Image: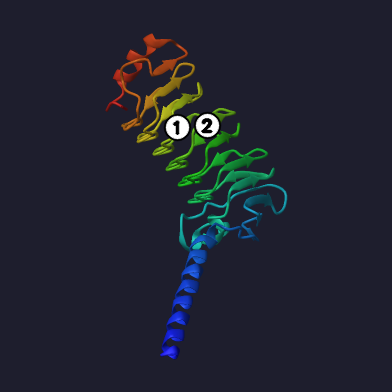
Amino acid sequence: MKARACFAILAVLAMAIAGAVLVLDRDAPYASADDSGTSYGITWTLSEGVLTLSPTNGSTSMHNYDSSGAGSAPWSASANRLSISEVVVKDGITSIGNYAFFSCYSLKSMSIQGNVTSIGDGAFMYCYALSSITIPGGVTTIANFVFYGCHALSSVTFLGNVTTIGAYAFTDCSSLASFDVPSTVTTIVAYAFTDCYSLSEVGFLGNGPASIGASAFAGCATSYSGAARRTGRGSEYLPNLFPTIFPNPF
């Protein structure tokens, strides 16, 4: 009888220990996963949540990666990806490749140094914690899907001459409440701001874009009527702009 009681106690203890291990395993990917390596002319190091990317020699453009599988960025292995909270792109890297930081859920801040001239499709897609971004002066196109699903994104700063905002570029950025379209933008592609539920104020600086694609602002808090939109040419410009767009972007 005593043996059975001891066995039962040991079994309970074993289950408790197993449960604790399971909890630790579940939380482990979010811990710091220090790592390093090289990829297509770029040296990368991950230390205490900070991912630093530097050119191996001179200057180089970043490779265009896949969103998953063998072709994904080497720093995006699950344990690494979930621990990245900050990214520093050093001077000498001239582009950010497709899906470079795809699903880096914990990424909160981004520092882009030097002369980056392009940011690829889906580069920051599903970076849920990213709250602000500064677009370097050399970038002229906001690529397709680049900030798709960045739920915390509330501030976008442009330093240069962006001319095009791509398809689904800011879709489902649910914290984005206002957005000033730079005067240099001539084209907003279809579905660019779809389902930005908090977006209630859109400002068109300068003359405003010549083309706004289908459903570019569908699902946003802003509407066709009212004072939610403004332009450097004054409110009288708006009725002349939006009736020429088919179908209605809102």
Looking at the image, the residue that sits furthest to the right is 58
Q: Of the residues shown, which amino acid type is indicated by label 2?
A: Val
Q: Residue furthest front?
A: 2
Check the picture and name the quadrant holding the C terminus: top left
Q: Please tell me which residue lies in front, 113 or 213.
A: 113
**Residue 134 occupies quadrant:** top right
Q: Nearer the viewer, residue 107 or 210?
A: 107
Type of amino acid at the residue the image marks with label 1: Leu
- Between the residue at mark 2 and the residue at mark 1, the CA separation in whole angstroms equals 9 Å
Q: Which residue is located at x 47 percent, y 45 percent?
A: 128
Secondary structure of the residue carrying tag 2 is strand
Mark nearer the N terminus (2 vs 1): 2
Residue 18, percent from left and from top: 48, 73
Residue closest to the far left: 247
Residue 123 at x, y = what percent?
Answer: 50, 46
Assess disc 2: are there few (<14), some (14-19) or many (≥20) residues with their C-alpha within 10 Å of its C-alpha: some
Is 103 on the left-hand or right-hand side of 228?
right
Residue contact at pointers 2 and 1, CB within 8 angstroms: yes
Badge 2 is on which residue? Answer: 156
The tag on residue 238 is none
Task: Classify 201 as above or below 56.
Answer: above
Q: Which mark is residue 176?
A: 1
Residue shown at the point (37%, 15%) measured from the top left: 227
